[in-house]
Amino acid sequence: MSQPSNFKRFVEVGRVVLLRSGPSAGKIAVIAEIIDHNRAIIDGPLTDVPRQAFPYKHLVLTPIHLTKLPRGAGTGVIRKQLEAEAVLTKWSNSSWAKKRAAIEARRSLNDFGRFSIMLEKRRRRDVVRKSVKKTKA
């Protein structure tokens, strides 16, 4: 008898993936077909990712996957499934996507933006310190 696996994210047709490299890096796509142990055909009609063969080492598997997606499905079928299951909404509401957006927003700040954040952190730290001191006293 085999032990139950804790691993939940498998390379499978319909799995939503995050691209780590290439011109579409940071966008999500769907595995449409598995080519071999190293590559899969991905397609992202709603995120402007063209249908292409992509190596697994440049993909990150997400916990989201499309149910009932047939093997080798065309772009139109994938588009309809993505819209029906509201995958882009699920992705944008996930903590993973929110963290990526926050990091990207931080990277795009100028010097004044970073300075403002420093002042806000200082204010928050002072409020916390004063309230802790008050509760200890």
Image (tube, helix red, strand yellow):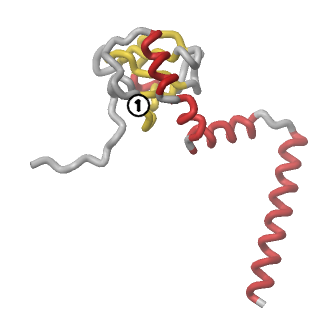
Instruction: Tell me residue 76's x, y (percent).
Output: 46, 10
Q: In which image quadrant can residue 110 be found? A: top right
* Quadrant containing the C terminus in the rendered view: bottom right
Residue for point 54% across, 22% down: 21
Residue for point 63% across, 41% down: 98
Instruction: Tell me residue 121's x, y (percent).
Output: 80, 58
Does residue 111 sit above or below 50 in this rendering?
below
Left or right of 113, for residue 89: left
The kind of secondary structure element at disc 1 is strand
Looking at the image, which is closer to me, 133 or 81? 81
Residue for point 79% across, 82% down: 133
Amino acid type shown at disc 1 = His
Looking at the image, which is closer to me, 105 or 85? 85
Instruction: Tell me residue 114's x, y (percent).
Output: 83, 45
Instruction: Tell me residue 116's x, y (percent).
Output: 88, 49
The residue singled out by tag 1 in the image is 65
Does residue 13 sit above or below 52 in this rendering?
below
Task: Check disc 1: other Cα within 10 Å, few if <14, some if 14-19, many if 20+.
Answer: many
Left or right of 125, for residue 92: left
